Amino acid sequence: MNKTKLFQNAILLACLGFATCLTGCTRQVNEYVAPPPPKVTTALPVRSKITPFLEQTGRTEASEEADVRARVRGFIQQVDFKPGEPVTKDSVLYKVEPDQYQAAFQSATAAVEAADADIQVKQARVLTLDAEKERAALELDREKELKANNASSEAQYQAAVAANKAAVANLASGSADVAAAEANLGSAKAKLDQAKLDLDYTNIHAPINGSITKTYFKLGNLVENGDRLATVVNDEIIFANFSISDRTLLEFMKARKLAQTENQIEPDTGADKWRGKKVYLRRETDNGFPFEGELDYVDQAGIESDTGTLGLRASFQNADRQLLPGLFVTLRVPAEEAVESLLIPESALIRNDQGTFVMTVGSDNEVIQTKVTVGQSVSGWAIIQGGLKDDDQVIINGIQRARAGLKVEPTAETLTVDAEALLRGRGQPDTAPVGSDTAPVGSDTAPTEAAATAPAAGEASKPTAPASETAPSPTTSAP
């Protein structure tokens, strides 16, 4: 048995050795397999009519704001409002203790009555003096006649002359007393008017319609003439003050002129061609520019020499009190006309010290680096002024994997833009698969928006008619 097992083991070892030799004689060959081309997303630029605009930050203020001030000195006797409540013009807000002013008014009334009585006494005396003057004149005439007939002495005649002069002088004096009494009456009436005014000022009224702040003086406090007691704010209309640099102004005027020329519109040559233009406003937390107002003032002094800026003001209806005075806001002033523009997502741009570039895909799926000129950037869109054509397939996703001259595997998408939403600070770049009839979920777009479709991978690019030819002109109605 042992010999048999040894023989079997020897045969098994021989077979294993033979198998090992066969395996060692067969060698594997390593061959290089190129990686698949990187996948990217491409889209054609969007051609649409975009309205030029200027954008600047500013501060809001209430259209009306008036301090409630004391007009007389005294103790506050009554406070007739609650902080923050609406008040109407001329409604009573405070009452100042009126006792001393009531007494002064009564004293002034008595002084007027006394001055009026004094006038009546002096007028009666004038009547008496006038009668004395008439009697003295008749006596003088009689003495003249007697003297002419040698029936009176010179002494009697001279006495009659003197009496007549005295009567005339007394009448003049009496008339002067009447005039003085009338002047005293005028002075007394003026003091009465002032006393009446001071008495009226003990009731402190609201100067304008609006909402009132808390009171700065409490019940029983002593106030002096001119003290500020509270403030009434009318914010049914909100003003937004802002300023733009002279360079920004000139660029905007140039853009407006270009838009007017393209749309064959005569430029506005009116004296105040800015007033009434639409203005959009955005608060710090707003999505887009939800508030629409109008430009109501441009600094008539022109560009300020110290800062090189032009001051402007816009007004906004604020019945719902969504805008508060003192807010830091962003304002956007659009031109009246739109200009045809070529747009791509701003994220598709590559910027370096040599300029601004985009990556495009040729008909052979090879990446091409194209230098472009970029104008304004709006809500994630870049307005291309040069270097790009309507049928260029622009890489909008996967740009970090693209290199000039590298082959890629493109997937075509459709870019859509809503010119109105863009102007209002919305309409962020969005895409939909090629051939889709509906806008992507969450997009602000509508069926009439400008759109561009990239051709399928490997197909030759074909120029397409500008979408702006079928898209409606952007409007500026409120959302």
Image (tube, rainbow, N blue to C red):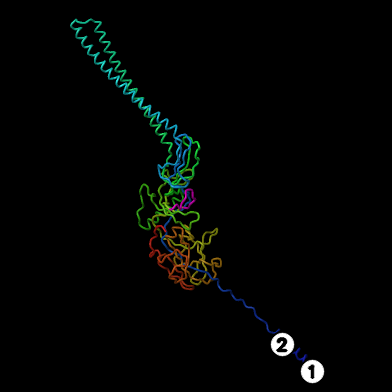
Give the residue type that dot 1 points to: Thr
327 falls in the magenta region = yes
Tell me the SS state at disc 2.
helix
Circle 1 sits on which residue?
4
Of 316 and 391, which appears nearest the observer?
Answer: 316
Above or below, comparing residue 168 to residue 28 in the picture: above
Label 2, label 1: how many angstroms apart (C-alpha)?
23 Å
- x 44%, y 62%: residue: 342
Where's residue 22, x and y in %?
70, 86
- Type of secondary structure dominating the magenta stretch: loop
Magenta region includes residue 141 = no
Say which quadrant the N terminus sits in.
Answer: bottom right
Identify the mark at residue 19; answer none if there is no mark.
2
Q: Nearer the viewer, mark 2 or mark 1?
A: 1
Magenta segment = 320-330
Helix, strand or loop at disc 1? Answer: helix
Choose top left, top right, bottom left or bottom right for residue 421: bottom left
Q: In the image, residue 126 lies at what x, y percent?
A: 29, 19
Q: Between 157 and 199, which is closer to the camera in this rendering?
A: 199
